[in-house]
């Protein structure tokens, strides 16, 4: 994939004549990476696709508010992760008022999902991660799976690096306890 | 790296067990773009260099309008009748409005912006 120079891209995004084509280039360049950030929070493919589409729509509508103070990917990640967290909150609210039978745990849902090919241990690990508070879980996933620097996560989540390190440390501890409990 | 992180690395891998439908990413860009509405283009001033140039231009335009009106009124004053008064007012109005409209079209500003600019409120 060709990586267009970001400063040139920003210029094109500001110009109404080239804006749409430039945004298409942005989507092409970053959509897969953003998708996986969303998927690790939202878990199912269908929901992840919906969240990602909404995130890009919001980014498109808010283009004028992006002034290049941060990297484009940081700005997009912020939108995508906020969309993901909002989605999860709405899901929790729906679950709270649901009159259906007790819902399946995350692990059982993943094992039944055509788009998950891990074994039961992996599914239960995902359940352990999903049980973390949303922001803590996000910090863990960005740090552990995306190997993102704390400075970058700080810009995405608008949280101090110190708070992020503490949050990550707690998340690691909890997941370690998950593994110990299975030993 | 803490002991817990080391332990985690030994028990976990970063392998991704989530999957997507075949061809999903190939079609994703087109799918996203098809859902984006046309952006409303707001009338914006040209960049600063041209914006600086606009002020003298508008000032000159307004001075020219006033001068034209004043000249028109002067030459018409002694000779005009009551009917001519109305005609002069109409012509003056036409001149000033059409001139301003033309200037507004040229600089892509609406009347409010021009008035604000002239009054120094811009």
Image (spheres, grey):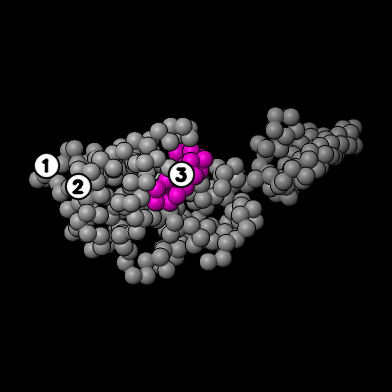
Mark 2 — on which chain does it sit? Answer: A
> Mark 3 or mark 1, which is nearer the start of the sequence?
3
Q: Which secondary structure class fits the magenta region best?
A: helix
Mark 3 — on which chain does it sit? Answer: A
* Residue A54 makes an appearance in the image: no
- Residue at 48% from the left image edge and 57% from the top image edge: A30
**Is there CB contact under 8 Å for labels 1 and 3?**
no
> Hey, which quadrant is residue B90 in on the image?
top right
Q: Which of B90 and B41 is in front in this view?
A: B41
- For disc 2, the neighbor class at 10 Å (few under 14, some 14 to 19, many from 20) is few
Image coords of residue B20 (percent x, y): 32, 63
**Mark 2, secondary structure of its residue:** loop
The magenta region covers A142-158
User: Mark 1 or 3, which is nearer the eye?
Assistant: 3
The residue indicated by pointer 1 is A99
Find the distance from the CA under tag 1 to the CA under tag 3. Answer: 34 Å
> Mark 2 or mark 3, which is nearer the start of the sequence?
3
- For disc 1, the neighbor class at 10 Å (few under 14, some 14 to 19, many from 20) is few
**Mark 3, secondary structure of its residue:** helix
Find the distance from the CA under tag 1 to the CA under tag 2. Answer: 36 Å
> Mark 2 or mark 1, which is nearer the start of the sequence?
1
Label drawn at residue A78: 3
The residue indicated by pointer 2 is A183
């Amino acid at each position: 994939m060709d990586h267009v120079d970001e400063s040139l891209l920003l210029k094109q995004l500001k110009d109404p004549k080239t804006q749409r084509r430039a945004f298409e280039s942005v989507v092409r360049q970053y959509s897969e990476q953003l998708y996986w950030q969303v998927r690790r929070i939202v878990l199912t493919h269908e929901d992840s696709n919906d969240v990602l589409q909404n995130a890009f729509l919001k980014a498109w509508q808010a283009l004028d508010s992006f002034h290049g103070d941060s990297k484009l990917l940081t700005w997009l990640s912020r939108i995508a992760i906020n969309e993901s967290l909002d989605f999860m909150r709405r899901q929790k609210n729906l679950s709270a008022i649901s009159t259906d039978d007790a819902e399946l745990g995350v692990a059982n849902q993943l094992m039944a999902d055509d788009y998950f090919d891990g074994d039961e241990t992996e599914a239960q690990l995902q359940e352990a991660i999903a049980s973390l508070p949303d922001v803590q879980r996000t910090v863990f996933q960005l740090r552990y799976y995306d190997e993102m620097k704390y400075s970058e996560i700080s810009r995405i989540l608008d949280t101090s690096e110190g708070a992020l390190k503490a949050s990550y440390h707690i998340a690691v501890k909890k997941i370690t306890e998950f593994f110990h409990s299975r030993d | 790296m803490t002991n817990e992180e080391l332990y985690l690395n030994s028990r976990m891998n970063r392998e991704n067990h989530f999957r997507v439908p075949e061809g999903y990413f190939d079609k994703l860009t087109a799918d996203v773009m098809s859902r984006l509405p046309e952006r409303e283009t707001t009338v914006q001033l040209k960049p600063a260099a041209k914006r600086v140039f606009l002020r003298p231009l508008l000032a000159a335009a307004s001075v020219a309008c006033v001068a034209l009106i004043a000249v028109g009124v002067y030459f018409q004053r002694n000779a005009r009748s009551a009917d001519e008064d109305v005609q002069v007012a109409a012509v003056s109005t036409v001149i000033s409005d059409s001139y301003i409209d033309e200037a507004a079209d040229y600089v892509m500003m609406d009347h409010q912006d021009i008035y604000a600019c002239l009054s120094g409120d811009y």
